[in-house]
Image: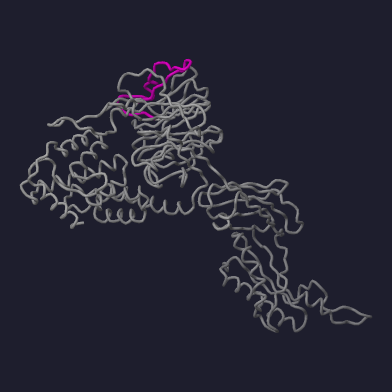
Amino acid sequence: MRKILFFFLLAFGGFANAQYVVNYKKVADTYFENKDYYAAATFYKKALKITGDSSQVVLPYGKERKSATDEKVIEDYEGSIYNLAESSRLYREFNDAEKYYAIAITFTNTRYKKALFYYAESLRANKKFNQAIDAFQQFIQKNPGDPLTKDAKKEIESCKFAIEEMRFPRMIQVKKVPAGINGLGSNYAPVKINSELYFTSSRPVTVGSKRDMVKTATGEIQVSTKANPFMNNIYTTKGELSSADIDVKKVDINFPKNIEIAAAAFTTDGNTMYFTAWKDKEKYAIYSSRKAGEKWSDPQPVGLQVNSKDFNSSQPFVTSDGKFLLFSSDRSGGYGKFDLWYCAIREDGSLGQAVNFGPDINTADDERAPYYNTLTKKLLFSTDGRVGFGGLDFFESEGDLVNWSKPKNLGYPFNSSKDDLYFTASDDQGTKGYISSDRESSCCLEVFEVKKEYLSIAGLLTDCKTRLPLADADVTLTNAEGSQKMITGSDGIYTFKVDSKRPVKLLFAKDNYFAVTKNYLYEELAKADTLLDKEYCLSPFKLGIPITLENIYYEFNSAELTEPSKKVLDFLIPIMEDNPQMEIELSSHTDNIGTEEYNLDLSNRRAKSCTDYLESKGIAAARMTSKGYGESMPIEPNEIIVKRKKKDNPEGRAKNRRTAFKVIKK
């Protein structure tokens, strides 16, 4: 990188005596100070002589230089590179940001020490997760006391999370809607009401001959900027989005000049619209308007319960029952920057006091764009305050506006390494809808259609002895996303839906039956189309009643297990693993050949050899008891009477030489 910088400085020397009419750096600095980052980046590139087909950087800014070693030249060069990187990042052009931060991290001036953090952030946004982890770790090592180290640690966790999540994509279709919706500027916050799709766009109001101009000594030059004529407004279109000819119209609302509006939300009947409105350098506020025919009434602020000149309120959402208005705000009393809040909508349309969603939902960072389904009781929102893919990610929580489950990241590809927000459903259950994301854009949000799909894992559970369906059994499915549980009915059927092909564990359990665990590996799930139809059975037992293990043999006159016998004992290993609270007694019995003392000792040693073997396979010794009963508990006669004479009974003695187990604790 030092060689590159040296080359750039040498390049400056060839222009040392040049005189430029326009001081591009000064123009760029002005745009940067006014937060017009697109225009700032445009002029920093001009100042650095970066063309559209070149990434080379040279130095003349339109005035004479004393020499290539002039400290002011170095200062201007480094400042322009850093501000170009900053402008690119803040304009969400992360490919450029990564490129210019890669130069800025070589600067020794401490004012640019954050370049390494933002370089890592740009790598993450560009899906270079392993490189991003390395860069974040370097930042932490070099800046141990910097407040950004906390963010760097969270970013590292997010990169690791993203790497793992992208190994197991969720079963979600994500498709960009046609160009008629995703035109110039940003396009976002889609919501479908009846047969109309409403969305926000900053597309040019008029193009034609209108230009943004910068005055120069020799005349005027044209500059493309994200500002005028790019103004946020709400648009609508009817019909199918797959249509080749999409007719998009701006919503007819009478607003004062230079007011921007965005993020519409509607009551169920579609006749009342809430939205965010703001003017440059003023706070965001929420307004409402009533529909009359094809027109909308003059917008009115919703009231001081939501709006204030001292804070921002934005991104409204109305629950389908019309009872609550949800929104995002940085008002006082929250847990971080922007929090989620809600307030009751009274029958007359007025609003109740705003209530914070609480710490289960809100973090120290931003929570945005709430969506709540009153049927499923699920809240979807976006946040950058939790471990995710980076930027704003969709999270889901289940609750009732008071109590909430722990929010879960909705995974890939619902989320991306950039910003993802503004979910709205197009069906009752929330399995289809629209989102906004800049995942495929170098700068701006675009509208995507999403459809959740599921893999069905189902089957029949029976009694191993009767082969009849087993009712009232607990079946639990567990994977990385958590657990689902159901109880079988009289038909013994179990069924679950999962939205990813991650490994799955099924646990079948019923009182007085041995629980069974079955695992589906990723490879099995990946091969399945839509259904895995598996039949399993549970074996019954009674507490304290022995169950004979067939074909357990020992070496002659010995307690040593034969290899085939070990295979039989292996049958107990999954039973013990699947029933972790269960304790058993392993018993051994002999026939009456030999003395009682010898047979008792031999049976004790044989029972102990069984528990020793199971312990060697990982079963805790504390869960097993060994006991020899010798010849004291025959199940068949060792001798039989034939014509009043005792006669040996080989078949009976064979059955008496047995090993059994019984459950002594569930």
Give the residue drawn at x 79%, y 71%.
635
In this view, the residue in front, 37 or 584, is 37
Towards the viewer: 343 or 440? 440
Q: Name the image quarter holding the N terminus.
A: bottom left
Q: Nearer the viewer, residue 327 or 305?
A: 327
> Is residue 384 visible in this depiction of the protein?
no
Residue 228 relative to residue 380: left or right: left
- Total marks in image: 0
Picture coordinates of residue 28, whole percent (x, y): 19, 37
Determine whether 608 is above or below 472 in the image. below
Is 435 within the magenta?
Answer: no
* Figure quadrant of residue 230: top left
Percent x, y for residue 248? Answer: 43, 27
Which residue corresponds to the image point at 45% horizontal and 18% vertical from the top-left? Answer: 290
293 in magenta: yes
Identify the colour scheme used: one colour
Q: Position of residue 596 (x, y in %)?
A: 74, 81
Picture layout, residue 119 above or below residue 610: above
Answer with left or right where residue 523 lies relative to residue 354: right
User: Which residue of the protein is positioned furthest toward the right in this rendering?
Assistant: 643
Rendering coords of residue 4 (x, y %): 19, 55
Q: Residue at x 52, y 31 (%)?
A: 240
Residue range highlighted in magenta? 285-314
Q: Is residue 557 above or below residue 614?
A: below
